[in-house]
Amino acid sequence: MLKIFNGVNFLDTILNVIFPVHCVLCGKEGSDLCLKCLSDSPPALRESADWIFPLFDYRHPPIKKSLWFLKYKNKKRLAGIFAEVMYGKIIEELSELSVMKNFQNPVLIPIPLSLKRYRERGYNQAELICEELVKLDSNSNLCHGVDVKTKRNFYLEKNVLIKIKETEHQVNIKDRRDRLKNLSDSFSVKNPEIIKDKNIILIDDVLTTGATLTEAKKILKSFGAKKVIAFTVAH
Ligand SMILES: [Zn+2]
């Protein structure tokens, strides 16, 4: 009985009994995209900055559709499925970075929504993915990051990077320079002591041009962050 409630909320569980959801690809019950079909999806191949690690190709319709479900349709269960694949990738990269570049005890930071958009939507999809990553990490024996005492690979900080300016949707702006201009000064940092001299892992759902992540990295660095890398579900 306990297992049913683990990780999903009660209402979600009830609704799923009455209206079961199925994987859009294989039809398996339980989620709009199952872990197997997600894992088999085409990887992100388009070029991105060397500090950004996207998982899947956004042009693959089930990826696009399930990310849209997570972002706008309250399909929070998908965050756990994306996080499972992302966790493996993070651990893989951390094992190298911690040795080669002294990238230790990183802080996990989700790309924030503005307060206005957060209130409209009720949740931040990047934050949900981060919360699932932390759950996976606390159940995992894979240790690279790493705090010897707690054996955790990273810590989540939701109260550091904040979005202070409502910006136009990036998808509506075609020119890259205009996108960067749209984003400039859109983020700020609260509690800078938390990130001073710390390594940072930024988490977002979709990488488009990289303008959002670049702007977030810039502001974190200006407040004293050490090295910043980022993971996204798709590109
Ligand atoms: Zn499936």
Image (tube, rainbow, N blue to C red):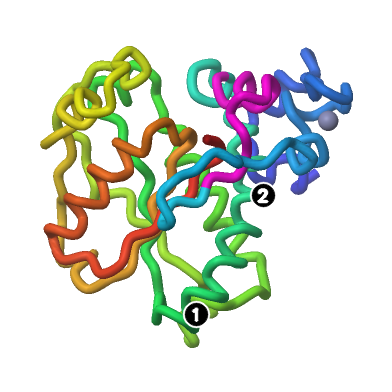
Q: Name which residue lies at 30% across and 36% down.
A: 211
Q: Quadrant of ligand 1?
A: top right
212 over 20 or under it: above or below: below
Q: Which residue is mark 1?
A: 150
* Front-lying residue, 15 or 78: 78
Residue 11 seen by the camera: no
Q: Nearer the viewer, mark 1 or mark 2?
A: 2
50 over 148 or under it: above or below: above
Q: Name which residue lies at 64% across and 33% down.
A: 77
Q: Is residue 182 left or right of residue 21?
A: left
Q: How many marks?
A: 2
Image quarter of residue 90 = bottom right
Q: Which residue is mark 2?
A: 85
Q: Position of residue 112 (x, y in %)?
A: 31, 38
Image quarter of residue 215 = top left
230 over 28 or under it: above or below: below
Q: Which SS class for mark 2?
A: helix
Q: What span is in magenta? A: 54-68
Q: Which SS class for mark 1?
A: loop
Q: Residue furthest bottom?
A: 148
Estimate how packed mark 2 is, as few (under 14), some (14 to 19) or many (20 or more) residues with alpha carbons within 10 Å.
some
Task: Locate the N terminus by quadrant.
Answer: top right
Q: Position of residue 141 (x, y in %)?
A: 67, 75
